[in-house]
Amino acid sequence: MANIKSAKKRILVIQTKTARNKSIKSKVKTYVKKVEAAIAQGDKDAAASALVAATSEISKAASKGVYHKNTASRKISRLSKAVNAMA
């Protein structure tokens, strides 16, 4: 356990940031699952609308620094490709 005041503060700050990042990542995973579920059911309209919501959440996560911009771009690209492949 840290004895120095600044180290104690860093521990608290890191815990706060970790909780925030975990929450945002969980939200993104939920939206991605909704898209994948719609694809599995073969519902093109539901998949397209879920894709829009998921894209928005992934972009927000990237802008907040939770995901690297290339990671966010890759996730969006793969989801879009999967939705577009439904025909």
Image: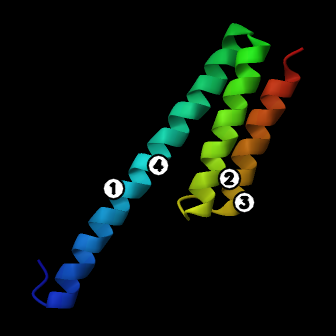
Number of other residues with Cα within 10 Å of mark 2, as a class: few under 14, some 14 to 19, many 20 or more = some
First reached walking from the N terminus: tag 3 or tag 1: 1
First reached walking from the N terminus: tag 2 or tag 4: 4
Mark 4, secondary structure of its residue: helix
Residue 7 % position (x, y): 21, 85
Mark 1: amino acid: Ala
Mark 2, secondary structure of its residue: helix
Q: Which mark is residue 72?
A: 2
Mark 3, secondary structure of its residue: helix
Closer mark to the observer between disc 3 and disc 1: 1
Residue 82 % position (x, y): 79, 28
Image height of 69 relative to 5, above or below: above
Residue 24 % position (x, y): 47, 49
Q: CA–CA distance between discs 3 and 2?
A: 5 Å
Mark 1, secondary structure of its residue: helix
Q: Quadrant of the N terminus?
A: bottom left
The residue carrying mark 4 is: 24
**Is residue 21 left or right of 82 when viewed as pictured?**
left
The residue carrying mark 1 is: 19
The residue carrying mark 3 is: 70
User: Residue 55 falls in which quadrant of the image?
Assistant: top right
Q: CA–CA distance between discs 3 and 1?
A: 23 Å
Mark 2: amino acid: Ala
Residue pictured at 76% horizontal, 38% vertical: 78
Mark 3: amino acid: Asn
Image height of 55 relative to 51, above or below: below
